[in-house]
Amino acid sequence: MKYSVITFGCRVNQADSLGFEEDLLARGAVATTPDTADLVIVNSCSVTATSDQGTRQAIRRVARDNPSARIVVTGCYATRSPEEVSALPNVVHLVRNDDKPRLVHLVAQDFGPAVDATTAQRFGDGDGSCGATIEPGVAGRTAFTLRVQTGCAEPCSYCIIPTTRGRPRSVPIAHVAREVERVAAAGFKEIALTGVHLGSYGRDLTPCSSLLDLLRDLGKGAQDFSPAILFRISSLEPMDCTSEIVDLVATSECFAPHFHLPLQHASDSMLRAMRRPYTIGHYASLVDEIRARLPDASIGSDVIVGFPGETDADFDELLSYLERSPLTHLHVFPYSDRPGTVASAISGKVHGGVIRERGRRIRDIGQRLAQRFRGSQVGTTHRALTLADGSTAITDNYLKVRIPAGQSRNEWVRVTVRNADEPLAADLC
């Protein structure tokens, strides 16, 4: 059986899709492009209306270009609007987020002898931890994305994800450690730790644990690998990024100097309306602390423009903070009503043209912040992991650089950044 996986959205979805690939490969399936696949898995996102639209367009494109393909849809859009998704062409299965670990097992019976039943039994129900054959380069990934938590109980007024991902659930530390050993044995040298609400890790476990406990345990174990594993921490809510976590990253070579801390807005009145549990003062102090402890760290953020009730004064507060902030890159999200959220019922909706203009202005700031960060890195030296054909690499502080030819994929190299304009170039040390 030939398969293809199309993934939208967050790193949690990327981790889930990597699990599908592992399970399919273990069952003897062969990866191909969507236009030649027997099975196409679409892992959907529903954080905005644009995300929903992207999934619909992808499904219709696959059905048009490959009429015989059987399309299985999972993810947040499939969980939120199952009837809408099921009505799309060639969709033969819809798998809710809670059933993702068993997705391949659930659909395998449709493909009969094309899926080796012996292999399927030997590797279980596709929970992504069964020892399936995988190595750097599968699904185009050099680093491995490891989901250690899912679900969210935060009451953000604009977000539909708690209803599509369910309550917070954490993977016990011992299980995470075993998965790290498996992934390292397969040849991966960098692991991105991810979760829907990563900072809530361990609160649901018995006995109760924390993200800091997990990071400390992984940091100790990383030294046992040669070369040591580099862990990259995915998105952390500002209230969850403690001084202890910042200190751990600053003092351990096992953790990348890279933070992603969603701000969403710099107006305290907007943060209250969004039901975000921090102030701009708290956020600014946090990123200033990170910059002081880790001068070369990348610090990314998410920003929402056009939230209901956002005034010109609110937007000016956002502009003012971002311009003077130590952030290094921005993801800009135009506000999108999500039916069923508190925000969808808030009056004072911002006109679409105003939202687009505000988004453009924030993206311009994001470009300036990124340029400033690149300029600050000229002449600095970093550990970097080579990608693809070895002519590019990702530094520990998340810069993509061109390097001299002659390296292979998935090698640690030391590089010195040579220029500030894209494409960035670096010399090997």
Image (spheres, rainbow, N blue to C red):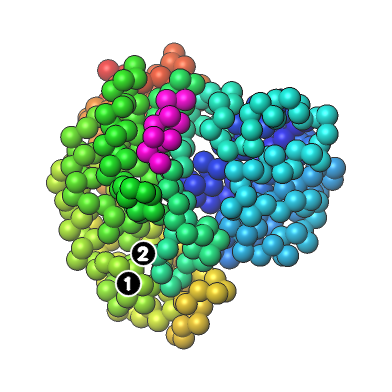
Q: Kindly indicate the quadrant of the structure image that contains residue 18.
A: top right
Which residue lies under the disc numbered 1? 271
The extreme right residue here reads: 68
Type of secondary structure dominating the magenta stretch = helix
Which residue lies under the disc numbered 2? 264
Does residue 402 appear in the picture of this structure?
Answer: no
Residue 20 is situated, as x and y percent measured from the top left of the image, at 62, 38
Does residue 8 appear in the picture of this structure?
Answer: yes
Residue 354 is situated, as x and y percent measured from the top left of the image, at 46, 75
Quadrant containing the N terminus is top right
**Marks 1,2: beta carbons within 8 A:** yes
The extreme top residue here reads: 406
Which stretch appears magenta? 172-182
In whole angstroms, how far apart are the C-alphas of marks 1 and 2? Answer: 8 Å
Is residue 133 found left or right of 176 in the rendered image?
right
Q: Secondary structure at mark 2?
A: loop
